[in-house]
Image (tube, rainbow, N blue to C red):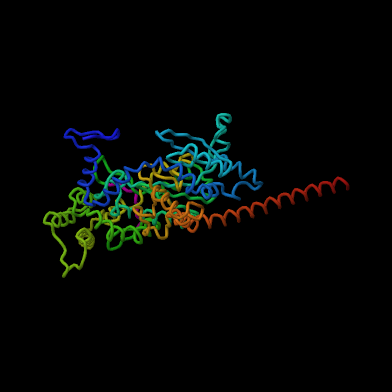
Amino acid sequence: MTTTKNETLGESGERKEDVKRQKLMEDDDDFEKNQALVKEEVVDVHSLMRPYYAHIFPSKQLFEWLSYEGATSSKESRKDQQQFIQNREFCFTLKGEIFVRYNSYQDEKSLRKDLKTKVPGKIDIGPVFSHNPKNRLAYGGSFKPVERELVFDIDMTDYDDVRTCCDQAKICPKCWPLMNCAVKVLDVGLREDFGFEHILWVYSGRRGIHAWVCDERARKLSDEERSAVAEYFSVFKGVEGGGEKKKTNLSFGSGKRAWGGGKMHPRLEEAYWKVLKPFWEKEFLPAQKLMESKKHFETILSMIPDANVRQKAEFDFNTNKMPTVSRDGDVDVNTWRWQRIVKAVEDELRGPKVNWDLTSCLQRIIFSHVYPRLDAEVSKHMNHLLKAPFCVHPKTGRVCVPIDPENCDAFDPFSSDAPKVHELLQEYKKFGADENAVKKTAMGKALETFERCFWSKLKVANEEEKKKKMMMNNNNVLNESNKNSNAAADMEF
């Protein structure tokens, strides 16, 4: 038996790569998913980055967005606009995990040239600084971030305690809907509660999503203000004492209902009834089978502060009680067992001695499992880096593409919705290897989503802001001219 220089043998003589592939297939029921994982490992993503940057990467669109044409100062000019974008940091991660920070560019051509020369495996976007980041050492303490999009990062690994299908970096169709749930909750909250309009949602390329809030008001937020926004959306607070009992910071006002006690904050109330509760009952419980898993079932029971309710639920679990079609309809056993817990809680709340601690436990269980879990530190600081849209994830080879927040359920990260770089290059060659060919590839669909859901509206807002500031500038000039004329007239008099 011979091996290549990249293969080594195990103790029994098998190639370690063969053993690894067999392990992948044994550890998961989904053979096709494991085959995809094996294929992703075989592809050398970095070897494809140079042609990707040369022919497909949309540096023009990226540069136009980050330049915010018309959105700088009231005395702007083309020179001012160049200075604005030149003060923006681009961070490259080169092969070998070498970080090159504080890159800056005066135009899209210089950015593309550097991409093709340095061939970064990852691109991160930083803030706009007070001075060109390349010259930061010359400015000492006066060099500081002055503007940056308000960003959010949600990673599937933060849901590992509620996932039964996957863990760590793995995702599958059973757990990915958690990301859709997060988009629905956060997008509405950012728009309706904070009045933000220009929000770009992006697939991270592997196991999560990013949000870029690009309104000028959002970009000018201080770190303290960013922290306040992040805290507003931070409901899940981890587990208690290293155990499995989950913590939330939910608070309830006065008022009593059949179950639920007083109402929550209006935003949480709306998120609960419109998004979280339906998702929990119809999708999450059946997909994750939490009511069939002893570990997760006990976690849920630990959040119910009533012995009678817990006892009834334990009886269902321990006796493997199941629904019947004639009596309960075609319902998943996990949803059915949850419905029986809900009924048990309602019965207790109607009893002569009400345990009012029960009034909010069902909401707390649902929020602690499926409410968006932010990496709040990413949002709190203006100078935090975040992976650029349209770059390629080095582990999966998938492009970080925009997501339509109004149709996020239709986004499939396992399909051409999140294209792989080698597939894009094959399509590019197939369709003629020119500018029009890019539009025919899966990147064309991604760019259409970018334009339709985000950039077209932001361009209009930038133009309106530009006209408004030009008008203000002209009025200031006119007022100054009139002031000088009046002063001269007074002197003549």
Instruction: Quadrant for residue 312, please give it.
Output: bottom left
| Location of the N terminus (image quadrant) | top left
Q: Is residue 173 above or below residue 101?
A: below
Magenta extent: 246-254
Q: Is residue 166 magenta?
A: no
Q: Is residue 253 magenta?
A: yes
As drawn, the residue found furthest toward the front would be 1
Numbered circles on residues, count: 0
20 and 144: which is toward the camera: 20
Q: Main secondary structure of the magenta part?
A: loop
Residue at 28%, 44% (x, y): give it. 239
40 and 104: which is toward the camera: 40
As drawn, the residue found furthest toward the bottom would be 326
Q: Is residue 326 above or below residue 349?
A: below
In the displayed structure image, the side of residue 395 where residue 221 appears, left or right: right
35 and 7: which is toward the camera: 7
Q: Is residue 301 visible?
A: yes
Place of residue 367 in the rendered image (x, y in percent of width and height, measured from the top left): 32, 53
In the displayed structure image, the side of residue 323 where residue 204 appears, left or right: right
Place of residue 334 in the rendered image (x, y in percent of width and height, measured from the top left): 21, 58
Q: Is residue 188 visible?
A: no
In the displayed structure image, the side of residue 31 where residue 386 appears, left or right: right
